[in-house]
Image: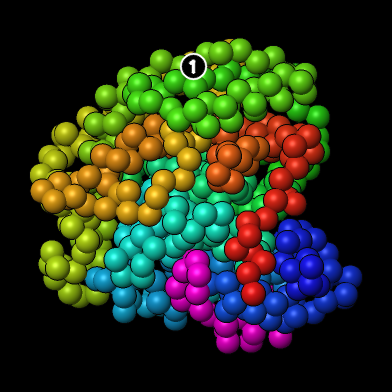
Amino acid sequence: MSLLHELAFLDATAQAELVHRKQLKPVELVDAAIARIERLNPALNAVITPMFELARAAAHGPLPDGPFRGVPFLLKDLLASYAGVRMASGSSFLKEFVPEHDSELVVRLKRAGLVIVGKTNTPELGILPTTEPSLFGPSRNPWVSGRITGGSSGGSAAAVATGMVPMAHANDGGGSIRIPASCCGLFGMKPTRGRNPLGPDFGDIMNGLVAEHAVTRSVRDSAGLLDATAGPDTGDPYCAPPPARPFLQEVGADPGKLRIAFTTTAPSGVPIHADCVCAVHEAANLCSDLGHSVNEAAPTVDAERLVNSFTAIWSVGCAQVIEGAAFLTGRKPAPDQFEELTWVLAQQGHAISGPAYLLAVNALQGIARQVARFFANYDIWLTPTLAEPPLPLGSFDARPGNPLHGLQRAVAFVPFTPVCNATGQPAMSVPLFWNAEGLPVGTHFVGRFGEEATLFRLAAQLETARPWAARCPATSSAQ
């Protein structure tokens, strides 16, 4: 194994330590990341906008003395704007759009010392749980190339899984951090609603469904990065409860004896693949072996109400994004400038009245209160991350006469993760299980609102008991 390969699979914390000790210069880390991207990306299609010269210039410094000084990083090409660099959001309509300012999250990522080397692939406007935009083509799963990476942060997940960078930006409106983390064998934490800022362009998105963070290989990287980026921006409409201490201090802290409820049954009743059931049972047994109280239980969730209300808000959000894109570009949207599903979903959103939209918001808030009552008796809710292992590419494509097939397929594939976007609770996908095909199958842990600390304590305990860092897809060592 080459030195560059070994370096690539150090986590961000370890890479930053090499810079801090002056054993490596930031530009050496950045050049190594660029070399891996150039070598591996043609097979994976994870990075769609290289920023190599900008990155080298930044790495030559001076860099802020943040916790990840000199560590290479990738931005998902959605929401997080970088001044002067295209942000297409997976859409032909926006393929020439260049923002004039950094988003607040990007300001904080730079302040942490990270060096952004490129932008990653995402489905059009982040709508689907797969990364196969018509504009850029599909990202491929590094474990089995004919399978999906998940979405909408699939490009970021494929890049981290193959060691292009140790961690990468991701965001989550219905599972878009946790889904690709599951599909690509990574750790993916969706923080509490309002934990990370969305400004200056947004206060919240789709009534609080969307959260910003990252996919990582190690738990400590996720915690340390959240410490660097969390906190309200000026004028935010609301923010998450402040943590008692830095999240990084929770990694390795004793979680105590947690009350964990587990289920392998989806609220909607869709069938759950045997591999995903097995992953939950193994995780439940591991938690029991670690001394936690584990029982089979689940909150009561009206699945039909959840799906209908979520879809209403999702479709209105799609229409709003297209209207916003028209305002930014000064161009009139037309059907031939968008994928068929996107355009039909937006038209569906336009047809929803204001009262109907607010009723959908009220319905999701009611579900959030139901789930919160469940957490009066439990600290953690354990479920499959997904109903199935990573699907074949093309599974979400529109079908003749049914442009919304992809969204309907998503309802069956992703029955668990959207609940936490509706409730605002933190949740994580943890890579504890690989199936007989060699595909990762994540397990999903949900915490109380504002309590990422509990999840980080448990995650670190699981990482120690069942380490996954040494598992690398064959793609990552391709020559």
Residue 63 in percent (x, y) is at 71, 77
Compared to 311, does 3 lie above or below?
Answer: below
Magenta-colored stretch includes residue 449: no
Please tell me in which quadrant of the rendered image residue 18 appears.
bottom right
Residue at left offset 63%, top offset 56% = 473
Considering the image in quadrants, where does the C terminus appear? bottom right
Residue at left offset 26%, top offset 39% = 408
Please tell me in which quadrant of the rendered image residue 333 appears.
bottom left
Question: In this rendering, would 26 be left or right of 49?
Answer: right
Question: In this rendering, would 473 be left or right of 383?
Answer: right
Residue 422 in percent (x, y) is at 39, 34
Q: Give, as a single range, the part of the protein colored magenta.
A: 42-65
Please tell me in which quadrant of the rendered image residue 27 appears.
bottom right
Residue 193 in percent (x, y) is at 49, 41
Residue 359 in percent (x, y) is at 22, 30
Q: How is the image coloured?
A: rainbow
Q: At label 1, which amino acid type do we have?
A: Ala
Q: Is residue 393 visible?
A: yes
Compared to 470, does 304 lie above or below?
Answer: above
Magenta-colored stretch includes residue 62: yes
Report helix, strand or loop for mark 1. loop
Residue at left offset 50%, top offset 70% = 43
Residue at left offset 81%, top offset 72% = 3
Q: Is residue 449 visible?
A: no
Write down the residue under mark 1: 298
Given residues 325 and 145, the one toward you in this image is 145
Compared to 444, does 396 lie above or below?
Answer: below
